Amino acid sequence: MIEETVRVLKSKIGEVDVAIILGSGLGKLAHQVEDPIRISYSEIPGFLRSTAPGHAGELVYGTINKKRVLLMNGRFHMYEGYAPKDVAYPVEVMKAIGVKKLMVTNAAGGIKLSFVPGQLVFIKDVINFSFRNPLIGPNDEKIGPRFPDMSQPLSNEWIEKANEALYKNMDQKLETGIYALMLGPSYETPAEIKMLRKLGADMVGMSTVPEIIKANHVGLEVIGISCVTNMAAGVLKQPLSEKEVLDVANSVSSNFISIVKIIIEKTC
């Protein structure tokens, strides 16, 4: 399957400086791509259908600030009924077409009490509370090792370079935090959030970790950005809603786009 997927993509796109997976409500970055080539997931062998709100379901190839980018405008989630290995399949494809750097983004609930809705945070580590792994099953050593090292799942060096560039060009730096994956699709309970806080989590969401695991497996350098769209259950006395997540992500999209553009231009 992957040979067919690679053949189809290479017939449509060229070399890539950085690939980016866009999370809920963060798809406006796709409109910043110059001379875009848009490929629906339905045209790509092995790709699933993205059913989550705020996920367009297309690859977008072109340039941003003179760097060649491949945007995954909409990701797949295990709560949609997909297997972890299929959720992470696009990352294996990225490696096969020559991608070396991957940026993952998401909308997340804020667990750390000092975070505020609309804040952007670099992911420095992850907790996999889905208890599912995209690497389960037979392993092909040509793709990656049976037991990949996860002692630095996100690139500390890339985070440092990105923050240096942001401070120099925008006079700001992003905090770092630990992202916890829960399976979903229900939002977490206050008791679950209290547990995650005690375990050291700063943000929580329903995505991203399978792609990070696969990226480490195949040897991609990874950086991650969470958009804190709401405070997690129990932090504030209000119910959580999908609309709130998308509204906040949309409201900070201009700052998100500016930050990602700087990171692309200065560190990729």
Image (spheres, grey):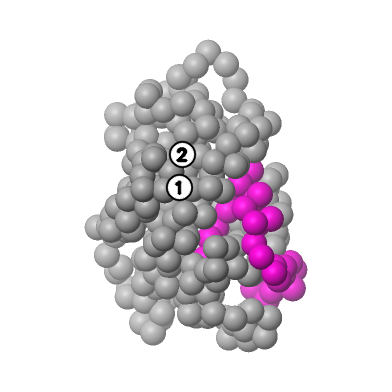
Relative vertical location of residue 20 with respect to residue 138 in this rendering, above or below: above
Does residue 63 show up magenta in the picture? Answer: no
Q: Label for residue 24?
A: none
Residue at the image position 50 percent from the left and 52 percent from the top? 260
Residue 120: give its label: 2
Say whether residue 153 is visible: no
**Dot placed on the residue nearer the N-terminal end, 2 or 1:** 2
Give, as a three-letter code, the residue at label 2. Leu
At which x and y percent is residue 137? Answer: 44, 70
Residue 227 higher or lower than 150, as above or below = above
Crowd rating for badge 1 (residues with CA inside 10 Å; few <14, some 14–19, many 20+): many
> Residue 64: which quarter of the image?
bottom right
Residue 145, position in %: x, y? 32, 75
Magenta-colored stretch includes residue 29: yes
Pinpoint residue 193: horizontal percent, then vertical percent: 42, 28
Q: Point out the image quarter for the N terminus.
A: bottom right
Q: Residue at x 67, y 85 (%)?
A: 11
Q: Quadrant of residue 180?
A: top left
Which region of the structure is painted magenta? 19-48
Total tally of numbered discs in the picture: 2
User: Residue 204's x, y, as percent?
Assistant: 45, 37
Mark 2 to mark 1 CA distance (whole Å): 7 Å
Q: Nearer the viewer, residue 169 or 139?
A: 169
Kindly identify the amino acid type of the residue bearing the numbered disc 1. Answer: Ile
Q: Is residue 198 left or right of residue 76?
A: left
Q: Is residue 224 visible?
A: yes
Q: Badge 1 is on which residue?
A: 225
Give the position of the C terminus as an image quadrant.
bottom left
